[in-house]
Structures are given as structure tokens and as C-alpha cells.
Image: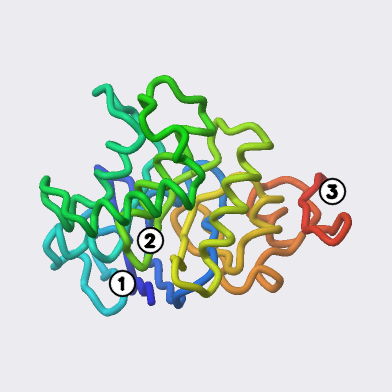
Amino acid sequence: MIRTRNLTITRGEATVLSDVSLAFGEGGITALIGPNGAGKSTLLHAIAGLLPAGAGQVEVDGLDMAAAAPMERARRVALLAQSNQVTARLTVADLVTFGRWPFHRGRPRAEDKAQVTRALALFELEDLARRQIDTLSGGQRQRAFTAMAWAQETPWMLLDEPLAALDPRHARDLMERLHALSRPGPDQRSIVLVLHDLSTAAHYADRIVALKQGRVIRTGPRALAMTSELLSDLYGTGLKVTRAEGVGVVIPA
């Protein structure tokens, strides 16, 4: 379970998160939504234990993330940030192997190599394993970075705007993979991600956390939390939640 208690984070004189208290269990996809500057990315990084809290606490499966050692945190959550620039000429296989760092500390063992092989297969990257990252398309790169996060073998995957710069085909492909991985099974991960595409959230998310000006406006199961009234108020413009061919979509009202 991820739990935040009265979490407040400031940057300079600005309060980015204010008195955020949340609790949600394992499994499925939790989408953080809200306008720009709402505190979504800040909350994701705080859950990962990478931002000091001015007040409050973050726990992941009972572990106090502020007090935990970096390697303890790295075995609990895998964070994929927005900016994934690689300067070294790494291959896809090299990149995915980095996800095993909390386990191998630079000396990959047989079990680490096996997990990398599974990640490459799971994200259909076997044919690209020897390709250098800087030669890939945007969709291929994002798949490789997500495979790296999965290979870290943490119960929780935290993804900050994983669909940014992806075309509709690659965005759908990645979300289908993430949705499948969040279902019960041997490869299951609990996924928390920041989404700007509200129709994607309406279709794939199991839980919604809606943020505005650093505060939680609403949280809960998608069907209850994601309403036309909420979204219109959240974004300051008319929005309507509807269904098209059985799929949730959000359109201008």
C-alpha cells in the first residue's frame, strides 16, 4: 500500500504540495491527473522518496521512504522520470540491465541476466537488444525505458508522463502493455502514472487521484472519481465524460 499522511512539500517560498493524505493498495493502474502545476510530478517523486517533505510522511508497503536507505527504496519502487536523456552510446540491453543495479551493483549475475531477457521479451525488444538507444524511434525508446523500470523488479512502478511525445499508435501500445502488467499474474506490477490524456485515464485507469494547486481534489475508483463535473472544475473548462463503443472518452462540453 502507498500511504501519504499530511504531506507538504515546498520549493523556495512556494508550496507545491499541501497536506496531501492518500492511501491506495496494490494492483491496477492509478492515474494522477490535474492541470499543469497541480503537483502531480512532485507527488510521484515524493512517493519515490526523492524529495524531502516539509511536513508529513510517505510510506510504501510500510516503509518510511524518507528514512529508508536508497537501495531499500530502489527495491520498493521504480521511478521513470519525464526526461530520459542518454548521453552514452548504450544498447537497449545495456539500458535494461541498469534496472537491475539494486541487485547486481555493477556485476550482473545469472538471475539478473534472466530478468533482463524476460523484460526484453515482455516488451518485444529482442530484435532491438543490440541497437543503440539514440537510434530508436520515440516509441521504441519509451518501451526500452519502461522495460528498464520493469526489470528493477519492484512491486511499484512510478511513471511520469510515459505517453509524452508518443503518437496515438505507440501511446495505445504502451498503455495496453502497462494495463496487462497491472493485472494479476506472475509479472504483475502496481502502476502509478501521471497522465494528461484524460480519455486514456478514462479507459485504462482503475483509480484516479485528481490534484489542483497542490491539493487532492478527489480520489477513488475511476467510475466514481472521474465525472464531467469534477473534470470541468479541475481544468476550468467544460468537459464531459462519455462512452464511445464501450470505451470511456472525455470530450469538450
Give x and y (percent) for residue 66: 18, 64
Q: Amino acid at mark 1?
A: Val
Q: Is residue 219 above or below residue 106?
A: below
Closer to the chain start, of discs 2 and 3, is 2
Q: Dot 3: within a 10 Å radius of its alpha carbon, few (fewer than 14), some, or many (20 or more) residues?
A: few
Name the residue: 41% across, 38% down: 82
**Given this view, does label 1 or label 2 mark the residue nearer the observer?**
1
Q: Is residue 233 above or below residue 36?
A: below
Return the residue nearer the eye: 63 or 240. Answer: 63
Q: Quadrant of residue 67?
A: bottom left
Closer to the chain start, of discs 1 and 2, is 2
Give x and y (percent) for residue 23: 43, 76
Q: Amino acid at mark 2?
A: Ser
Image quadrant for the N terminus? bottom left
Q: Amino acid at mark 3?
A: Ala
Name the residue: 53% across, 36% down: 164
Q: Secondary structure at mark 1?
A: strand
Left or right of 174 in this view: 118: left
Q: Which mark is residue 18?
A: 2
Q: Which mark is residue 253?
A: 3
Q: Secondary structure at mark 2?
A: strand
**Given this view, does label 3 or label 1 mark the residue nearer the observer?**
1
Q: Disc 1 marks which residue?
A: 60
Specify the farthest residue to the right.
245
Q: Is residue 33 visible?
A: yes
